[in-house]
Amino acid sequence: MLSLPLSTRCVRPWAAATQKLPKVTKSTTSHMSSAGSETTRAAAATRDAPAKVGVYAGGKEMPFTSILRIEDPDKLPVWPVFRVLDDDGSVRADAVEPKLGKETALKMYGNMVRLEAMDDIFYNAQRQGRISFYLQSAGEEALQMGGAAALDMNDMAFTQYREPGLLMWRDFGVQSFADQCLSNISDLGKGRQMPVHYGSKELHYQTVSSPLGTQIPQAVGAGYALKLSGKDNIAVCYFGDGAASEGDFHAALALAATRDVPVLFVCRNNGYAISTSVADQYRGDGIVSRAPGYGMHAVRVDGNDALAMFAATAEARRVCLSQKKPVLMEAMTYRLGHHSTSDDWSRYRSSNEVKQWKANHHPIRRFYSYLEGKGWWDSAKDRVLRDRERRSVLIALETAERKAKPSLGSMFEDVYEVVPPHLQEQKHQLYAHLERNAGRYDGAGG
Amino acid sequence: MSPSVARCPRSLAAGSAGLRNVVLSATSASSTGSRIRSASDSLLLRPPRSNREPRRQRWTAASKGGALARPRALHPPGFPNRRASSVVDNDIDEDDDSVAAGAHGTKGASAAAGPGSGCGTRYAEGPSTRMNLFTAVNAGLRTAMETDDTAIVFGEDVAFGGVFRCTGGLKEQFGPDRVFDSTLCEQGIAGFAIGYASMGKTAIAEIQFADYIFPAFDQIVNEAAKFRYRSGDQFNCGGLTIRAPCGAVGHGGHYHSQSPESYFAHTPGLKVVMPRNATEAKGLLLASVREPDPVIFFEPKILYRTSVEDVPDGDYEVPLGVADVMREGTDVTLVGWGAQLRVMSEACDDAEKEGISCELIDLRTILPWDFDTVSRSVKKTGRLVVSHEAPRTGGFAAEVAADMQERCFLHLEAPVQRVCGYDTPFPLVFEKFYVPGRFKVLDAVRDAVNY
Ligand SMILES: Cc1ncc(C[n+]2csc(CCOP(=O)(O)OP(=O)(O)O)c2C)c(N)n1
């Protein structure tokens, strides 16, 4: 039931005919244009001046219509996908080429190659039992690196797990990634979380948490804090098409819109949430189409186009900051690999589908072609780069394996700022138990 | 010994769906049978709610009839665990079928007394098949759907078989209307399941990991649990079962290891169940699905592949609310549930070598729990050790300990010992030290005996 408007300007529907009508806004007239003439015709038979507009909850003017029509979302236009580069790496004729500069472009490319090398080697290390778990970014390198390059290093990042590229861009070294995956003494998370749950306060990258969607409203709170403290930074929040089904996503968008929060939501729509394809995840035009419902700016981007990601992220960020408003970006991409090392994609999708994406839309190859076309890169340089990156990842992995594990006592730390008495007691109980059972816990922990 | 199996009527309603097996001890079948049909028992049976599967309040009936019907003498000390579930593989990663393949299809020739499943407990007549726990869950779901055409199975990634393979083949057999992927939204899954069940139908929802059940907490705790009470029994969602894999696996860290049973055990209106092996899993799952109240069914995921047993092919139930004395002893009572029982069994073996006679009890149902069986044991042994993986403070061991000191105060020879996870988040790299392992349980047993 509609709540009655409180505004004195309000036109009560039943009193409309006797009141001076407010002007119908442009958008409402255009939206209802087809219905308008029929309304007039129908009205002629009944009353001279049918009400045109009502003012409802929130003082919102809404046009009346006498045409009963249930809107069919499939009749709405499909949101276009913003693209700068075509699949062959050429700049689209009508596109504005973002002025990246050679240095930034090569840094983006170098990081994409590094991410690919790290994924490949860590994935295989998991298969060999050297790492307990891993999760690759394959296919989403441009999405991550193009966006990362357009953000400010101090923009506070909230991610899901498939966005290590942003952290890599901010100079989190391969060694640091390896240390986290090996849960060693150098892991900033002190060995407590599964691999790929990175985080770095210094690099404004909040620690990854497995429960899906939880970071989305948190990013809104962080963005609000940035806004209140007058910082020229935004919060940026990444999540998958699956996570966008969680209640937290909707809670976040409503809050961000109503509090006018400078937060950039980036949905990585890679087609799947583990085995569940988007066909079972949503109806309607993807994730981006939800933004207008929340009164939010939005853009849909080709996530496999590093330049489009760069340009769109830069522009979205500008809108966030200049208007102090949230923006929702939907980046269209494809998860080329398994969901994680616990998954096997052959159970739920065809190898042709994967092959097709790999062959025709590979984000790294597309960006390589662009760079080559500019005369900034070639195959000889590429070979050297790839060799170097692979070698450095291997060295990082071996180094991480040799490092000690965190000290056992640290298990009881950081639950609270100060270790409370009951945890101190439990720690002493553990130590007493180990003393009593000397030799029975060999080879475990440090 | 040639155990016979008694059956009890599926319902009191004429013409209802046939007979169902109940768990009976090997040698007391006839007396049990008569007890089950006693007048007091039938008073506990509800009339059918609709013209389909009527639901019985079996836990109440069984905790009276069943517990009485199972004299402890039928459980020879030390019997079951020598033959406990064989360890096949420790890799319990999601979606890795390598072991499952080997675990399928070994048909057992004779009726199944599940190894590791209560001394001489008979689950069902007829053939059995050697299978692991996820396959037993799968078999239970299949039976549930075959015997109740309102039953639906859904959740995240359920249609392709589930990340732990529990729902494999169900979509193919029962079709996409009855077996489907939900959107990725636990509160939605729980709410949907409640609404479906409120229409008198059977909803079997999967939460992919117990660690991810919390978005559904409101729906479960404030809605499902209070559905019947708040409407004066006009509405109920008794047809609801929520399955969720729980517990430590060796490398799960914070969010793939938790055992959140005590959060739900703190909620009047819910039933909370956790099986300890494959045979029990199928029987408890079927009982849960047919239970007239909402059930949270936690599956210890470490057991999905490692608990391999001869699971009866037939339709059988293990009653809710009835604990199982897995091993008889005289010096100390140990109480646990789920995968922790394997750890505790090992500790019992160690203790027996030191001359300590242990009685090991599987609670099976955590809410409402079988305090009769536990207190009878504690009054005999005078000592109690309760153990679970979940953190110590506010864990269900605290409830068992408090209750037992009320009921058995004058019988206790030592303080009740709790062996639990520490009060920290589940730490990846320290898992081995964090969990209440065999040696910690053994220390507690010794401490209780030497107090
Ligand atoms: C609250 C919650 N529910 C379920 C899971 C298990 N889970 C982990 S990843 C995942 C799929 C996520 O898909 P999506 O958001 O599309 O991201 P993608 O993996 O495709 O990058 C699921 C269901 C979880 N981590 N958290």
Image: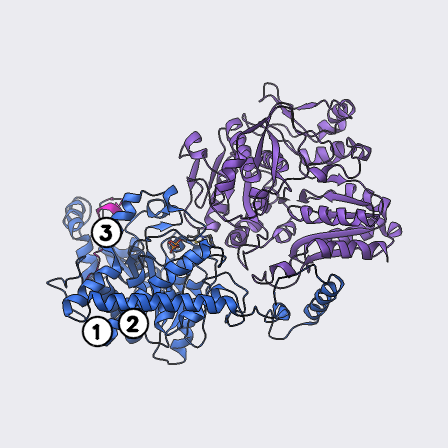
Q: Work out whether mark 1 precedes mark 3 in sequence or the reverse, and give the earlier one.
A: 1
Quarter of the image containing the C terminus of chain B? bottom right
Residue pointed to by mark 3: A359
Confirm or reject: label 2 Cβ below 8 Å from ligand 1: no
> What hue does chain A carry in this figure?
blue
SS class, disc 3: helix
Lateral position of residue A72 relative to residue A92, left or right: right
- Amino acid bearing label 1: Leu
Assess disc 1: are there few (<14), some (14-19) or many (≥20) residues with their C-alpha within 10 Å of its C-alpha: some
Q: Are marks 1 and 3 on the same chain?
A: yes
Which residue is painted at 59% across and 35% down in the image? B282
In this rendering, the answer to whether B209 lies above or below A442 is above
Residue A307 visible in the picture: yes
- Nearer-the-camera pick, A336 or B367: A336
- Region rendered in magenta: A68-84
User: Does mark 1's beta carbon lie closer than 8 Å to ligand 1?
Assistant: no
Identify the mark at residue B61; answer none if there is no mark: none
Q: Identify the residue position indicated by label 2 in the image.
A: A149
Q: Is mark 2 in CB contact (under 8 Å) with mark 1? A: yes
Q: Is residue A134 visible?
A: no
What's the residue type where badge 3 is placed?
Ala
Q: Secondary structure at mark 1?
A: loop
Circle nearer the N terminus (2, 1): 1
- Residue A100's label in the rendered image is 1
| Label 3: few (<14), some (14–19) or many (≥20) C-alpha neighbours in 10 Å | few
